[in-house]
Amino acid sequence: MWGTNDNVFMARYSAFNPYRLRHRDMGFPTPIGAGDAMAKSLYCGMKPTFCWSCNDPNTPTGGIFNLEFSPDGSLLVAACEKRTIQIFDPINHHRIHCMVGAHMDCINCVKFLDSRMFATCSDDTTIALWDVRNLNKKIRSLVGHSKWVKNIEFSQKDKLLVTSGLDGSIYTWDINSYTEVFHTSSLMRCRLSPDARQMVLSTTGGLIVLIHDLNLATLGEDLFGFKPNLYRLMQMSQQLIPIASKYDYLFDPDRKENRVEFISDFPGGNDAEVVSSLQKERWTSDDILVPAPP
């Protein structure tokens, strides 16, 4: 049980308390127990309103790897471990449709392109396009990645799909063809800001790369040969590595397009390791994206 003193402590170190934010900004150490208090303040008010059973042997689900609402909020689509796509009505909680065998392997991500069309990606290395008005078969499969495809984004301003996979490649698709726009070893995830002006990448080595003023049309040419891990090694070692230093221009603050930034301001002793997920934090013209815990 939490006593009166505990409640005061929890309120003081709540995630929403300006005092706590100011305390952190000034660099003061966090008191023991503040993390637990913050977690309690965040989660104690969350109550489930409905729980759907996934034990139906005719519609195997396994783990649910991703959820995505349609733009108008009328549909909720789940990407499932056992090759199924589940579609729900989030208002009445009914399952509308289940597509068994939608891919040949685990389904990792769902992304709506508009109110009727969505894309899925899978460990079978393919991306599939679907129309909610006719779910009996996929519109088409997109083939290009050589390993598991883990992420799908959609650039509204460019009308392009952006996918990333464990082959280290990021591809853009105009539905009929694809172009590799970047390749780096140990790539984990790739996300776009809502206005598609920024792209953020994360790696298995804990490196987070932010690309400002994104231009997908020239990204492949601008970053050709750039190796983020090698450049970061040069920064950390403070020793010149000629093959890395020739890409200094990518970090120039005056660069107009595809300017690169490394996110590295993690607390001392708490550096990122495998950054396995990224999530948008704000929905403004200056959106930033933050790593989720591994």
Image: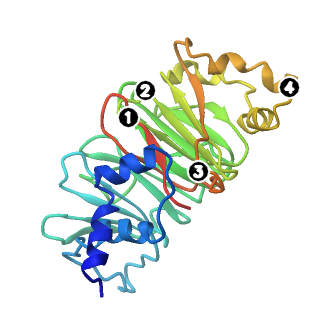
The residues bearing labels 4 and 1 have C-alpha atoms spaced at a distance of 33 Å
The residues bearing labels 3 and 1 have C-alpha atoms spaced at a distance of 22 Å
Earlier in the chain: of badge 3 and badge 4, it is 4
> In the rendered view, does 146 fall on the left or right side of 156?
right
Are circles 4 and 1 on residues that touch, CB within 8 Å? no
The local crowd at label 4, few if under 14, some if 14 to 19, many if 20 or more residues have their Cα within 10 Å, is few
Residue beneath the point at 58% across and 60% down: 123
| Along the line of sight, the residue nearer the viewer: 41 or 181 | 41
Residue at numbered disc 4: 240
Q: Nearer the viewer, mark 3 or mark 4?
A: 3
| Along the line of sight, the residue nearer the viewer: 67 or 269 | 269
The residues bearing labels 3 and 4 have C-alpha atoms spaced at a distance of 26 Å
Badge number at residue 197: 2
Callout 2 amino acid: Arg
Callout 4 amino acid: Leu
Residue at numbered disc 3: 267
Indicate the position of residue 244 as horizontal and vertical percent values. Answer: 80, 26
Residue at numbered disc 1: 287
Callout 1 amino acid: Asp
Indicate the position of residue 6 as horizontal and vertical percent values. Answer: 31, 77
